[in-house]
Image (cartoon, rainbow, N blue to C red):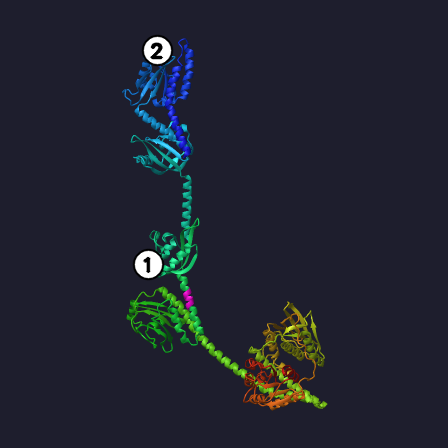
Amino acid sequence: MTDYRQRYEELLESNRRLNEELGQVKKILAVEKTPASASVSDTTSHHKSDQREIFDSVSSYLAMFRKTEDDKIVVLDLNTRAASVESVFRNEVVGLNLMDSRLSLRSNLIELINAVYKNGTVTRMAVSSRNDDSEGHYIGFILPANTVLVTWEPGSLQKSRDDLSRQNVIFSNFADLLPEMIYEVDLTGRILYANNQAISFFGYKKEDIIQGIYISEMFPDNYAVMIQNLNQLQSPGQISSNEYTGRKKDGSFVPIMTHSFGIFHQNRIIGYRGVVTDLSKRKEYEEHINREKAFLEHLIDSIPEAVAIINGEGKVTIINKEFTNLFGYTSDEAHDMLVDDLIVPEEMKQESITIDLLARERHKVIKQTIRKDKNGNRIQVSLIATNIEINRENVAYLGIYRDVSFERKSQLIQEILYNISTAALNQLEIKDIYPTIVHELSKIWDTNNFFIALYDKKNDTLSLPFFADEKDNFDILPARKTITKWVITLKKSVLLKVNDLKDLENSGDIDLVGAPCKVWMGVPLKADKEIIGVMALQDYHNENKFSQEDVNVLEFIANQIAIAIQRRTMLDNVIAASRKAEEAAESKQQFMSTMSHEIRTPLNEVIGITNLLLQGNPREDQMDFIKTLRFSGNHLLTLVNDVLDYNKMESGKIVFEQAIFNLSDFLKDIMRSYSFRSKSKSIDFDIIRENELPDEVIGDSIRLNQILSNLLSNALKFTESGSIYVILKTLERTDKNINIEFKVKDTGLGIPKDKHIVIFESFTQASADTTRHYGGTGLGLAICKKLVELQGGEIGVDSEPGKGSTFRFVLSFGVPGKGEKALPSETSESYVGLEGKRILMAEDNKINFFVANKFLSGWGVIVTHAENGKIALDLLEKDEFDLVIMDLHMPVMDGIEATTILRRSENPRISGMPVIALTAAIMSESHDKIENLSINDYVLKPFKPRDLFEKILRNVR
């Protein structure tokens, strides 16, 4: 502002100097009078120079005239100011006869010039022909060379106009300093002034303004409106702001805004001024914003979820089409309404406030909640609420609503079905399922009037395992002509209202039983395409309580309930069958246990006495009989063991030991055992290692021996000549495991291809006469297959008749870590170490005791006999013993009960007594009973002397 004020003061100073110029002219004329002796040409030349100098420096009215010899007045010159006052152009009048020019209309000017020439003095005369002050006064001066200089002083009106003109000069100069576009027009619409910025913007020059430009040219499309708007400016202080489209000089159009006000002089409007603003950029911004707004609105409308933008006051500003679809409000209805009043149920208002607060605190809230539509219907929605931030300031927040009513209902139905199915599987009886069904259905419907009816087709009756009703009570009723029977016959779901029920009754299709209801909804219970009953809901008060959608949902649930009921019935049948099977298996197990005991007991006696006879140094002729007896006993024991072992594997009660054993020593034992038998038949036998094998592995050596023994026994049995080989090969090895392939290859009879599978079945052999020719139970290969598969391996055979057989199986073993070693095998056959030990033997069979006592006494053991468990416990209380051998099957008190009492004794000498179980039963049968008794070890009848000795030595005190 300081620069503008300084410029304004400079303009005022220039205007002040303008008034002094006339005085300067007078002084110049006074001092430069031409002498009489001077020639006319010199004087004229001299004065022309002076005149141009004066004309160039003076801004007041100056005009020069000369009278010719023929009394014509010639216009010599006039300056810009004079031309302006006279409203002429200099080149239009200079050099012309005054009477032939436009100045000829100035009669007082002509009179003034003539008076000056006549009087030779300064003459003053009014400009107006009325000789008043209205147009000011001419002042005439006589100059050398017969020249008259005329100047002009304004009258009161002209002075006022001069003041206005000076203001215009100040305005023009000031306006050029401003960055805005400034203009001035007169009442006719002619543009009197435009500052540099305006001229440059529209592409014009100042000369164009001087020549004359009208707003009708620059605003052809808006001219009439502009004039109308300007005419409304009737008093100072009024401003008219309007947008127009202007045309530049090059013909291009631009959007502008004008802020116009009137120019008043002596309370009369004489023109208009104003400021022009280029709206091009703003229009571009607006267009950009409008495009983005349209894009945003389209985007929001395209979102499949309901969207609402809410301002800081909680009022809706924008909603999309889906919001209207979901809640029923149009954009006009929702605009500027509180969102809580529109869609939030009364009981959810506090939750909504909490969500709003969290969203405004720049949190993103995701929540499943309930909202209401225009009609008050509750809607399950998934709500996402988040704030909208501009320049780190919250300006609104966004609410996105997704209707999850169907999902929630589906989820609820799934929960209901799951809970009903679970109850059907877990409840002990079918009748216990129905309360669960009612409880679950009450999550969707009012079950105060609900029943489940099961149809007895044979008796044509309905039983109601569940019946809840406000007015009636039924248990069993005839099905004939009931709504339930009608639905069963119809085989589809129904929704019956009052009129429907009356129509059915009038038609004779049904006879209403019980109190009449307003609405009845029933669905058949279908299982395996058969209708087993009906599930129904009814209401006594509201006819519109249920809809067709409810029927569809209930029908879906009913189908699942029928399946659950049927599944429960089937499960009950399976459970009953399972119990029968378990009872049969238990009977079988008991039978096998009893048979094991009954068979092994005499075998124990036979084999035990045979061993005693062999230790008595019999004669050579007796030795043949004893060995034959032992072979027959062992063969019979093998047959019994095969049957019992297979039964044990079938029941899944076999346990595999995981212990480190020396594979090399194991193979040497196999080689030693079968070399003698193969030599006796002149058959080559060898064990071949195809690649490197570890010396020690972790596994069950006893079961491996059982598999190989069965396969080698078969090979020896069916091979009359040729060779038998055991071939081992490492297939895969890691740091902890190794897979080994075993092959037993022979040159025996061979097996037909169609028998390769059946030979592994129990009690099956390759041909019907195999047993007759070669003996055996047909269980050997079945046992091998079971033992291999239970250890995760596989077994197969490659064989052709006459070309021998190759049995192959693969087992996985553990590899011992560093420092892990197998226990050294006992190779000594000496029976030293039990001398003087006191052993109590509880055994009811006298022969078994006789055999065992013979061996024990021979080892230096002091033996005490007890015939049952009760006697054994009494003896333990009285005497000191180092170990107890306890038979598990005894009268009065068996070994299991006696051991249980022994372990519970408060006497640590008795409770800590080592106990070895002695049994003729299958160990798996007694295993469940003895596993918690802390029995130290067991010996199976018939026992091997060495086995009994080692176990006693290992456990004795």
Q: Is residue 415 magenta?
A: yes
Q: Secondary structure at mark 2?
A: loop
Return the residue found at the far top. Answer: 37
Residue range in magenta is: 411-416
**Residue 623 appears left or right of 649:** right
Residue 448 image-quadrant placement: bottom left
Q: Residue at x 31, y 14 (%)?
A: 115
Q: Is residue 659 magenta?
A: no
Q: Which corner quadrant holds the C terminus?
A: bottom right
Mark 2 Cα shell of 10 Å, populated few (<14), some (14-19), many (≥20): few
Q: Residue at x 42, y 47 (%)?
A: 292
Residue type at numbered disc 1: Asn
Mark 1 Cα shell of 10 Å, populated few (<14), some (14-19), many (≥20): few
Name the residue tied to disc 1.
375
Give how far across and how far down residue 630 sits, in percent: 66, 86
Q: Which corner quadrant holds the N terminus?
A: top left
Residue type at numbered disc 2: Asp
* Residue 70 badge: 2
Q: Earlier in the sequence, mark 2 or mark 1?
A: 2
How far apart, in angstroms, are the residues tagged by discs 2 and 1?
A: 109 Å
**Residue 520 appears left or right of 716:** left
